Amino acid sequence: MPEFGQPTPKLPSRSWELSGIFTAESGQPYSGYVSFDLNDDGNSVTDRTPGLPRNTFVRPATYSVDTRLTKMLPVGRTRLQLSAEAFNVLNRANISGVRTTQFGLSMDRLKCNPAEIPCLLAPTGAGAFAVANDAKDPRIVQLSVRLTF
């Protein structure tokens, strides 16, 4: 700390700063659902797969590395700050949502045993159970300039 009347020390003429954040999250639990009103309560959105408790399944874990590089440049009595920030540097596909419909109702006699119509069938293809349907942002880089006077 300078004494009273002494000039304030200046920042080094060219200083660099590097910082980062590493985030690791375990996968979030979710339940399997059926795509119709199984218990006839008028709400087909909340009917879980019969025989399974809540939160039986778990989404994949997510990992992210965010970095920031800053350079300070003196410009007369002012300072110029140049920054580069990168989010999700490793460009990892962090899954944040999956399809939760485990079974749908079918009236198709070719797909069901004729003695068991209607029957429950698992969706296939892109709509299949546990297929990723949402992900966090990919790698993003941003540059900034800040003038402090």
Image (cartoon, rainbow, N blue to C red):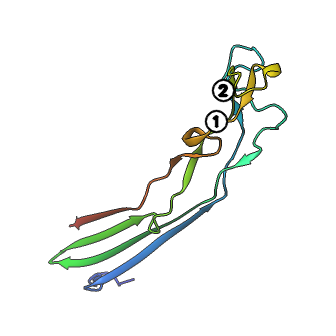
Q: Camera-side residue: 148 or 142?
A: 142
Q: Residue furthest left?
A: 76
Task: Give the residue displayed 78% in from the left and 38% down from the top.
Answer: 54
CB atoms of marks 2 and 1 within 8 Å:
yes
* Placement of the C terminus among the 4 image quadrants: bottom left
Task: Give the residue displayed 28% in from the left and 77% down from the top.
Answer: 72
* Residue at numbered disc 2: 35
Residue 38 placement, left or right of 83: right
| Above or below for 79 versus 114 | below
Q: Which mark is residue 90?
A: none
* Residue at numbered disc 1: 123
- Quadrant in the rendering for residue 109: top right
Task: Give the residue displayed 75% in from the left and 42% down from the top.
Answer: 55
User: Where residue 142 sits in the image (x, y, percent)?
Assistant: 31, 62
Residue 125 placement, left or right of 137: right
**N-terminal-most mark, 2 or 1:** 2
User: Where residue 140 sits in the image (x, y, percent)?
Assistant: 37, 60
Q: Camera-side residue: 141 or 101?
A: 101
Q: Residues within 10 Å of mark 1 (few under 14, many from 20)?
A: some
Task: Give the residue displayed 26% in from the left and 83% down from the top.
Answer: 7
Q: Secondary structure at mark 1?
A: loop
User: Where residue 42 sits in the image (x, y, percent)?
Assistant: 69, 13
Mark 2 vs mark 1, CA separation in Å: 10 Å
Q: Camera-side residue: 10 or 15?
A: 15
Q: Nearer the viewer, mark 2 or mark 1?
A: 1
Q: Residues within 10 Å of mark 2 (few under 14, many from 20)?
A: some
The amino acid on which the numbered mark 2 sits, given as a three-letter code, is Ser
Q: Camera-side residue: 82 or 149?
A: 82
The amino acid on which the numbered mark 1 sits, given as a three-letter code, is Pro
Residue 86 placement, left or right of 129: left
User: Where residue 117 sits in the image (x, y, percent)?
Assistant: 77, 19
